[in-house]
Image (cartoon, rainbow, N blue to C red):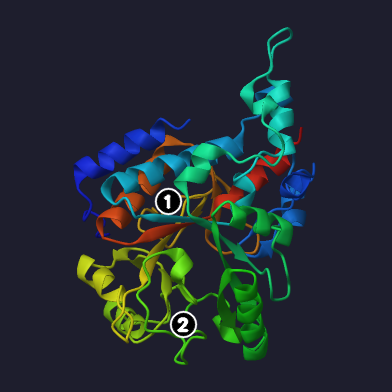
C-alpha cells in the first residue's frame, strides 16, 4: 500500500481543483522548426516519433500544448509558493517554454476567424518572454549540453539571454569518464551552469559519489545562484532502504541535491529525512529539490495498476521508445492531473526546498504528430 496519504485531503483537493482549471531571433531559433526534435532525458527520440502516423485533425483545432504545460506549471508553482514563498521551481528540458515560438504564433493565426482582430498570442514578438510562466519558475535543467552525445536543443545564445533574465541553469551530463565529467563541470561553471555528472555505469544517476565535489565549500546555500555544485540522485535502485540512501546523501557536501522523493517509486521520505538532507556533512545548509515527472507515466510508481496498458486508462497514449515501462500520457486528462496533483502536494508538505519538473519535453511528441 503506497504511503502517499501524508498529504492532507484538503491540501490535495485544492491543488486538484487548481490543476483542473488549467485548461530577438536567437531565442526563437531552436524552437521554430516544422520538424521539431523530440529529446527526452538526453535521448533523441525524433526518428522514432516521426515513424508514428500523424493525428488526423484540422490545423485550427490543434491544441497549444506549450501554453497548457506552462499553465499547469504556473498553477503548481502558485500553489507551492502560497505555502512556502521561497519554493524553487526548475523545469527539465523546458527552456523552450519561456519564450514565444513561431509554432505558437502560427497556430494562433490559424484560430482567428476571418475578420476578427489579431490576438495577443499573435502580436507577441518571437522570443518574447511568457511573463506569467517566467515569474513562476527559477531555472531550467538541461541534458547532454557538454558531454557526448550532445543532444541539448538549447543553444548557448538562448542560455545567455535567459541568464540575463535572471533564470538559473543546471545540466545533467552522462559522461564517458571522470576526465570528461570534470571538464564538463569546469566548462559549465564558466557559463554559469551547474553540472551534475554521471560516469560509465551510473548513467541513470543512481549512485552517490564518495569523492568530494568540485567547488566543495562550507557556505550556507540559500538560493540556486549561491551553489557551486549539484548532485542528482534520480534512481533509488542501488539502495536497500530509504534510510541507507539518506545516510549516503548526508555524508556529502554538495550545495544542491536533486532526489527522487519516492523510494522504489512508492515509499516517500519522511519530513525528518528531508530536513536532515538540508545540511551538508560540514554542517552548513543546502537546497534539496524533489524530482517530479509530469509528462510521462511509469509502471514502477505508486499509482500504477497491474491491468493498465496503452489505452487503459485512456490517458495512457503510447510507449516511450527504448524505455521499458514508461508511457506517453495525455497530461491534460483529469485522472492524470489527480495523480500529479497528489504527488506535488505531498512534495510541498514534506518540506522540500523546491522541485525539478521532469517529462515536460513529452509535449513535443504531440507537436510532431500534429504538424501545422
- Within-10-Å neighbours for mark 1: few <14, some 14–19, many 20+: few
Asked which secondary structure carries label 1, the reply is loop
Whether residue 113 is situated above or below residue 344 in the rendered picture: above
Asked which secondary structure carries label 2, the reply is loop
Whether residue 288 is situated above or below residue 104 in the rendered picture: below
Residue 315 in view here: no
Disc 1 to disc 2, C-alpha distance: 32 Å
**What residue is drawn where x is 34% and y is 80%?**
245
State the image quarter where residue 275 is shown. bottom left
Q: In which quarter of the image is the C terminus?
A: top right
- Residue 174 position, x and y percent, is 62, 76
Residue 307 numbered tag = 1
- Residue 249 position, x and y percent, is 36, 81
Q: Is residue 289 left or right of residue 230?
A: left
Q: Are marks 1 and 2 in contact (CB under 8 Å)?
A: no
Number of labels in the image equals: 2
- Residue 287 position, x and y percent, is 37, 68
State the image quarter where residue 116 is shown. top right
- Residue 224 position, x and y percent, is 45, 65
Q: Is residue 283 left or right of residue 24?
A: left
Which residue, as the protein is rendered here, is positioned at the far bottom?
211
Q: Name the residue under label 2.
A: 207
**What residue is drawn where x is 46% and y is 40%?**
72
**What residue is drawn where x is 74% and y is 52%?**
37
Amino acid at each position: 500500500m503506497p504511503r502517499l496519504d501524508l498529504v492532507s485531503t484538503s491540501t490535495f483537493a485544492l491543488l486538484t481543483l487548481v490543476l483542473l482549471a488549467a485548461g530577438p531571433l536567437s531565442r526563437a531559433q531552436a524552437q521554430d522548426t516544422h520538424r521539431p526534435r523530440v529529446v527526452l532525458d538526453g535521448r533523441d527520440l525524433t526518428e522514432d516519433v516521426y515513424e508514428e502516423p500523424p493525428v488526423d485533425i484540422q490545423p485550427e483545432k490543434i491544441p497549444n500544448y506549450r501554453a497548457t504545460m506552462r499553465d499547469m506549471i504556473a498553477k503548481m508553482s502558485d500553489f507551492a509558493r502560497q505555502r512556502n514563498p521561497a519554493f524553487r521551481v526548475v523545469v527539465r528540458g523546458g527552456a523552450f517554454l519561456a519564450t514565444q515560438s513561431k509554432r505558437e504564433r502560427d497556430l494562433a493565426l490559424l484560430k482567428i476567424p476571418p475578420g476578427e482582430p489579431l490576438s495577443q498570442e499573435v502580436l507577441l514578438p518571437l522570443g518574447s518572454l511568457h511573463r506569467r510562466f517566467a515569474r513562476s519558475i527559477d531555472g531550467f535543467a538541461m541534458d547532454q549540453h557538454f558531454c557526448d552525445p550532445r543532444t541539448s536543443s538549447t543553444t548557448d545564445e538562448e542560455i545567455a539571454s535567459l541568464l540575463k533574465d535572471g533564470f538559473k541553469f543546471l545540466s545533467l551530463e552522462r559522461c564517458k569518464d571522470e576526465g570528461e565529467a570534470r571538464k564538463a563541470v569546469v566548462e559549465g561553471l564558466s557559463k554559469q551552469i551547474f553540472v551534475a555528472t554521471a560516469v560509465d555505469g551510473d548513467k541513470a544517476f543512481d549512485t552517490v559519489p564518495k569523492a568530494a565535489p568540485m567547488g566543495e565549500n562550507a557556505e550556507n546555500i540559500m538560493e540556486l545562484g549561491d551553489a557551486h555544485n549539484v548532485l542528482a540522485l534520480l534512481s533509488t535502485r542501488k539502495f536497500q532502504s530509504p534510510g541507507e540512501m539518506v545516510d549516503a546523501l548526508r555524508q556529502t557536501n554538495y550545495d544542491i541535491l536533486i532526489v527522487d522523493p519516492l523510494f522504489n517509486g512508492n515509499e516517500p521520505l519522511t519530513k525528518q529525512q528531508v530536513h536532515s538532507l538540508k545540511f551538508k556533512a560540514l554542517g552548513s545548509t543546502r537546497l534539496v529539490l524533489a524530482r517530479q515527472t509530469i509528462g510521462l507515466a511509469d509502471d514502477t510508481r505508486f499509482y500504477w495498476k497491474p491491468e493498465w496498458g496503452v489505452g487503459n486508462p485512456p490517458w495512457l497514449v503510447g510507449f516511450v521508445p527504448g524505455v521499458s515501462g514508461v508511457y506517453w500520457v495525455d497530461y491534460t486528462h483529469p485522472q492524470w492531473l489527480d495523480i500529479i496533483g497528489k504527488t506535488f502536494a505531498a512534495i510541498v508538505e514534506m518540506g522540500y526546498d523546491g522541485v525539478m519538473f521532469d517529462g515536460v519535453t513529452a509535449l513535443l511528441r504531440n507537436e510532431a504528430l500534429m504538424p501545422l
